[in-house]
Amino acid sequence: MEPSLASIHALVTKLKKELFSKVKSENHQLFVSPSAYDTAWLAMIPHPVEHYNPLFHGCLEWLVHNQKEEGYWGESGNGDLPPVDAISATIASMVVLRKWGVGAKNIEKGLRFINANMVDMLHDQRHRLPRWFSIVFPATIELAESSGIELNFCDYTKSLIAEISNQRQQILCKEEIADKWKSFPLLAYLETFQSEKYDVDQETITKHLSEDGSLFQSPSATAQAYISTRNPKCLKYLMSLVEKCPNGVPQKYPMDQELVELSMVDQVQRLGLSEYFSDEIDHILRKVYRSYMVKEYSPEDNRFIAEKLFKDSLAFRLFRMHGYNIRPSTFCWFLHDNEILRHLEHNYAQFSSVLYNVYKATDLVFYEENDVHDARSFSRKMLQKISAMKNVDDDDVVIFPNLLQMIFEELNTPWTARLDHLDHRMWIEQNKEGPLWTGKASFYKLSCVHNMELMQLALQNYKFKQLIYQNELEELKRWSKKWGLSEMGFGREKTLYCYFAVSASTCLPHDSLIRMLVAKSAILITVADDFFDMRGSLEELHFLIDAINRWDGEGLSGPSKVIFDVLDDLVRDITNTLVLHGKIDLTEDFRSLWKETFNSWLTETTWGRSGYIPSVDEYLQISMISIATHILVLTSSCFLNPSIPENKVKPQKYESITQSLMATTRLLNDIQSYQKEQEEGITNLVLLHFNQNPDASMDHAISTVKRLLDMKRNELLKHVFTDDDRDFPNQWKHLHLSCFKVFQMLFNSSNLYDTDSELQTDIAKAIYVSPKHELPKCTKPHTTFQAVPKKGNVMISVRYHDQYIMNNHQLSKRPMRNISPKVLSSTMFGLCFI
């Protein structure tokens, strides 16, 4: 069923009401996936008066209703089997149900799952089981046996259990009960020591209780702490936890509210949904930013260093992306603590998600920010080690394949070379597991991925954009064919490439008009540039330039006439549309931009054919114009809301950000095109440096240009991500960034623009092929049942899960030109262009 605008807006409205209202109320249950293991331990606590009933009846009920169809409890996996932590969660859940005499059928299903799958799950991961599993798993086996649950294991299974039990014993012998570096020291596994000869007295437990009454913020350990000590602070903590999270408790509580909110913003943006929640995102970032402005880093308990670094690097990236003035010291503090550095370097695999976030934060580095460069170098080195790992021998490490894939993507393709639309697709597809943090006895997701409606919205939004793009592309092909641009007989036919770059490069609230304007301009630029380089004689070119300078095509013929007629029609169409939108007539300004560009092409062609070698300064002055990126951003920016001031659309008076864009795109082109242009006799900055330094190699010339590119790139990023240019709307700045990203993508490691097939896979993913992400299946209504434990009755009520049905509206297959401009401008989907 195809998505509709109505169904998208319905989901947005629902999520605004339910999801983001939870942010304001500090209710995290929609953001952090519940832990069946910890919920089971809370359900084990007997009522202080009615000893035959659970104290937290809701936790017991949650377990009854949240068993997977396959028979296990816990998070779903990517493959045929769930993650290994489902074993411990399933056994603990069955023990609880047996304890209170409920859920006999649940226990039967659980036993079938354990007996059918445990051998495969343990065997597949026997050499990379994490520390927490080695601690928890043997204890849950003993707990099941003491509860009367019959686990009929074969000899091989028993040998695997014995092997893991031996690992557990080694851990217990070599570790301290409260290690300052372990996020979860041994005492955080208090619930697992009840059948061990590992006596933990009440004084030790009470000594390590936090101010909130928890034992290392672990619900399961605190549940056992309360059972052992009856400490009222523990009870208060547990009561607060259940009140806040009645639908299954998380693995850690309380969560850092700011970290949850920042993760929420990050997920929404990376799923391509920020356009719908801009007010909510702004509210969250303003609030968290205020707290960052009043606090400085001070050493805390080393157990929470990883979480703090995770949060601070995420905050830095989000603040900088949204133009906040944020200091690198807010997340680079770890560089100045040798003990922390050594710990990260020695245990890099344990901190894979932390280092991944540090590295992503350093994407937004400005010129001469040495600490950020150092953080990037350090995190990259660690991620390269993680990416190269064949086998993980550390007993505390499990790295999910999807996280490894994202690390590989970050290391091999800079974010400036990735188009937003395809990045959103990757995030949708890779977030089947999506863990961002390691829990004590499982993996919990500090994300919204497990929220069905949010993932459904991301999928619908992506598919809906594809429908729009398909219609627009067909219209653009008709336009190219009508003017004969696709059949010129020379040069590159890039209608598809140009539209792909326009539609996939970014997501801003732009409509079809802007996408089509930029795509048409890019097609015309390609055809005209090729005419100057490949086809036109100097006489023809001078004749065309004379006509353009007069803006009169009288006497032109052949390709020259086609180029002028398309140019004249395009400028007229743009200016007429602006006037209809209540803007002033910018005809002469747009003509001047094009005239300047055409004259730069003539100059370069004259240089090449006469053998003239310009100076570097002379070359840059002309080539920054001939790359023509200023035309794309300045003409289209007039349609923004709010738009760029009209007095800024002037040739030879470009703003610093536009000059940075013109320089970076030219340098990117020259680095990857120097061999081709050398053969064609075209001037190129790399070739100029090589010719001026005959004793140096071509590699030296390329390195010189790359260093200049790095400097100009950092300048551009600073212009985009700071509020120094307050006269310009943020959307205008991001147009410049989007245009740069397209050129970075095309010229990152080779010249993709001159190929015929290299981009076909990405084009298909962006426009035609739907993302591969299977939404969670809707749960059928549960059956009411009455449970009769040893004493008294416990009634478990029926719970129905909401089922979303997409609206059966489909986007018309007719050409986009037949769709009302009013409808187009109100959709807020059309976000993508150069």
Image: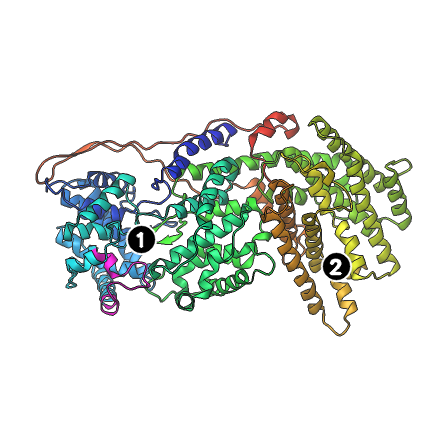
Q: Which residues are magenta?
A: 170-190
Q: Nearer the viewer, mark 2 or mark 1?
A: 1
Residue lying at 70% horizontally and 47% vertically, measured from the top left: 655
Q: Position of residue 68 (x, y in %)?
A: 29, 43
The disc label shown at residue 442, or none: 1
Looking at this view, name the residue that lies furthest to the front: 294
Query: Which of the two residues, 663 or 412, is positioned nearer the viewer here?
Result: 663
**Res. 58 image quadrant:** top left
Q: Quadrant of the C terminus?
A: top right
Relative to 124, 209 lies left or right? left
Crowd class of label 1 (few under 14; some 14 to 19; many from 20; radius 10 Å): many
Q: Secondary structure at mark 2?
A: helix
Horizontal side, residue 264 vs residue 101: left or right: right
Q: Is residue 537 above or below residue 685?
A: above
Could you say whether the residue bearing mark 1 is in a helix, strand or loop?
A: loop
Q: Position of residue 792 (x, y in %)?
A: 9, 36
Question: Between 72 and 613, which is closer to the camera in this rendering?
Answer: 613
Residue tagged by mark 2? Answer: 676
Please say whether residue 78 is one of the residues in the magenta stretch.
Answer: no
